[in-house]
Structures are given as C-alpha cells and as structure tokens.
Image (cartoon, rainbow, N blue to C red):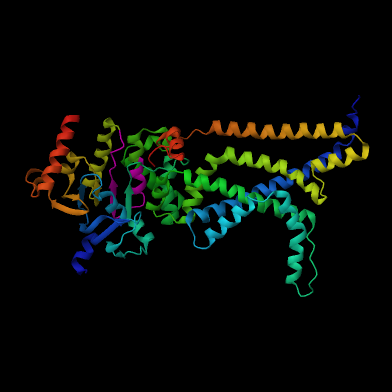
Amino acid sequence: MSFDFAAVINATPYLLQGLLFSVELTLVAMIGGMVLGTLMAITRHMGVPVAAEAVRVYVTLMRSIPLILVLFWFFFLVPLLLGHLTPAGRSIPLGPKFTAFITFTLFESAYYAEIVRAGLKAIDKGQYEGAKALGLSNTTMYWSVVVPQVLRVTAPIIVSQTIILFQDTALVYVLSLTDFFGAAAKIAQRDSKLVEFYSTVAVVYLLICSMGSELSERFRKKQGYRSPRGRFERTRRMFGLARP
Amino acid sequence: MDDAFSTRNEILRIEGLEQSYGALPVLRGIDLHVNKGERIVICGPSGSGKSTLIRCINGLETFKSGTIRVKDVCSGEHLRLLKDIRREVGMVFQGFNLFPHLSVLENCMLAPIKVRGVKKAEARERALGFLQKVRVLDQAHKHPGQLSGGQQQRVAIARALCMQPSIMLFDEPTSALDPEVVQEVLATMVGLAKEGMTMLCVTHEMGFAREVADRVILIDGGRIVEEAAPAQFFDTPQHERTRAFLGRVLRGQAEVA
C-alpha cells in the first residue's frame, strides 16, 4: 500500500486558499461573536427589563440546536421568510458566504455570551461596588473595570471555544463552500487520494489547535496580577465554598 | 426641612431611614446629620445595621423609606440623582476594592477623568499628590496585587480622595488588615481628619474614635441607641446597651493587646 503525498504538495495553493477561508471565518465569528456575546452577557447581568429575557431565550435556543441545523435553517428558510416580507413575494437568496459569516457569528455569540456571563458573576462583587462608589457610569464600569478582568479570567475558556469554532468551520461543507476541509475533500475525491489528503488535513488541524491551546496556557501563566484575596479564595468563591 | 443656615454647613442629613431584608428590619428609622468638618464614628454589634446605613448613603443599598440628603442633592427611596451623590461621597471599603488590572496611579486617575471630566495630565498630578499624602507614592506604578494590605487600603483612601468628595465614608477600613498595618491606616485617617475632612466611619477601633471623633454613635438593632462626644460616650455612657457593648469591645481589645 503506497501513499502519494506528492499530490498533496501539488495541491498546496488550493488548500491554502481553503485554509485562508477557514481562518477568515473563524476570526469574523470570533470577533463578532465576542462583541455580540459580551453585550448580551452585560445586558443579562444588568437585568435590563425585556432585553435580558430576550437574551436568555436566544442563548438557550442557540445552544440547544446543532450548528448544522442552524446553518441549513438560515440558508434555506430565512430567504423564504424574507421573501414573504417583500411585496414581490419571491424568496431572497442569501449567498452561502454571507450565510456562513452571519450564522457562525450568531451561533458563537450565544456560547461566548455564556462564558462572559459566568465571568461577570465570578468577578468579586466589591469591584462593582468600588466602581459605583466612585460614581463611574455603567458603561465605564463595564468597559474599564469589569470586562478587562473578565477577559483575563475567561481567556483560556474563550480560546477553547474559539478552537472548537475553528473546527466547526468545516461544516460549511454543507453549504458547498470551500474551506480547508472542503478544499482537501474536493481534491481527494478528484484524485482518489482520500487517505493522503484527509490525514494531512487532520495533522494541520491538530497543529493549529494545539498551538492555540499552548498560547492560551502561556498567556494564563503570564498573568501576574493577584486580587487582594488571592486566586485560591477567588476559585473557592466561584464554587460557592467561601463567603463572597 | 432645610433651614438656610444649616444647609450651608450641613453635608449629610438622614431622616427616618428604614430598610429591611425581606421581613427582617435592619434599619428602623435612623436620623443623622453631619456638618462640614465633623468626624462621626459609628459602632455597634454585628448585624446592627451600621454597614447597611452607610451603604445606603451612596446607594449601594436601597432603602424602604426615609430621605438622605448629601449637600443639596436629596434622594428618596427611588435613588434618583445617584450619580450626583456618588460624586460627593467617597467610600473606603473593608476589602479595598482596588482594580487589580490597573496600576495604582491608574486606579486613582480613572474616576476623575471619567466622572469629573478632568484632563489626564491634571488627574495624574492630583493622583500623585494624594498618593504622596497617604505615603504610597513610591508604589504608584505597581499593581495593587503587589502591595501589602495596609498599602492597598491607603491607595484606596487616595483613590477616593482624588474625587475630592465632600464627605468620606469608611466601612470598617481596618477590619481586614493584619494588626501591624492597622496603625498605618488609622494614622492616615487621623491625618485626614486633622485637615478637616468630613468623615463618617464605621469601625471597631475605639482608640481612633476617642482621638478623632466629634461624635460617637452606637447603633443596635437598627436604631441609634446613643450619640455623644467621645468623652461622654466612653466615660459616662447613658444607656445600658452602650455600657454592655463597650464592656465587650474594650475587654476584647484589651485581651488582644
């Protein structure tokens, strides 16, 4: 049984194009998802009437449905719905790329929202009180005091979620979009070299994802600051084992 | 409610303050006024409502009924105008509540810039000045986590002072500190008092109260039991509860010393 990895080498430009799209999609969904997710988490944490409830429903929904289903739903059903809204009544097609970017962002935002919300609750209540006592507005409090701390504390989990997101981008296959996996699959099928291509793809995913994990671990270790009561106290409080 | 003469001099007036946690009454009608430059010490057994009382002043706790007036800003139960009140009221917490991701200097600069619209350079000057006053200037570029408890609390005091409040509230500022550093923080507070800062202080440090307070107030069961100048309060307490409290506290402090 011989493997012809030369075919893989030859296909590198095409594979790289696919990889570029995967990375692009990941970045857009991560940044968009984090921005949206953070806003949603803050809305819920502040208990804004109506909006907080709407966020809760949205997050629960998005986290209960498989991504592949959300992709299909967005791709096939939303154009129909939009069509009903227009006077002509014809379905408005959304390009697969647009669908992918929007859907992934919306989907991931629900997950990021939960991560950030847990972070907001984990931050010492005294931080909120100290900020309020100084007269800081809610905006300043969240922007300058709370969220920077939340991001530092939740960074490893956010990186985890982003790594999962990166792997999930392979699902655009069902929209006939060519990401890294899709590019490899196409050529593998054309050239009948499934083993070579799929194992290469697996190795590349492995390398990228473990680099991400490693970076996050290094970042965590670099965090020098201590809260006045120390990390152990904070963790105990997070799990409800110590007085807040 | 206000007579023009007292308004000019009066920084804080609390009338009929009531608060409950669910069915449990915590404050049962507190009346209190503080004039400019006065130093008030509030003491009492735990659970008496003293922390709740001062946290109501700057809106960290809501209250059921009564009014709180800080300078000329009046706030009823609905806590309107909270921002205006918080600008005038500085607070120092038992747990310091410094922002760990900012340097000491940045901690002190944040509020003046964002709340009072002070320019960055001026905020910096002001912060450095107050940090020097509380004698942690050499720590200005460190982060709170690198400081000792006593230093952190002094930074917290400087941070509150940077907002140039009309009144400073202290919520058991030394209760979380190691005994060795309690004195350095108290000394800072005494220095503040001597400069004429209006202070409302919840504390168990009776020595501090005796040295600095204009009035000492005992709160028990959500009510003001006794309110008197330190000499009278400590030497000739009028109420049984005051005597009992003082007996316990001073005995306790004598044992520790």
- Residue A10 lies in the magenta stretch: no
- Which residue is at the far right? A191
Residue A227: x and y, percent?
A: 43, 37
- Which residue is at the far left? B236
Residue B144: x and y, percent?
A: 41, 37
Residue ID at (52%, 58%): A52
Residue range of the region highlighted in magenta in the rendering? B155-177
Residue ID at (20%, 53%): B38
- Quarter of the image with the N terminus of chain A is top right
Residue B80: x and y, percent?
A: 37, 64
Residue A229: x and y, percent?
A: 40, 35
- Residue B172 lies in the magenta stretch: yes
Which residue occupies the foreground of this view, B8 or B171?
Answer: B171
Which residue occupies the foreground of this view, A193 or B253?
Answer: A193
Which residue occupies the foreground of this view, A78 or A162?
Answer: A78
Locate residue A43 relative to residue B223 in the image: left or right. right
Number of numbered tags placed on the structure image: 0
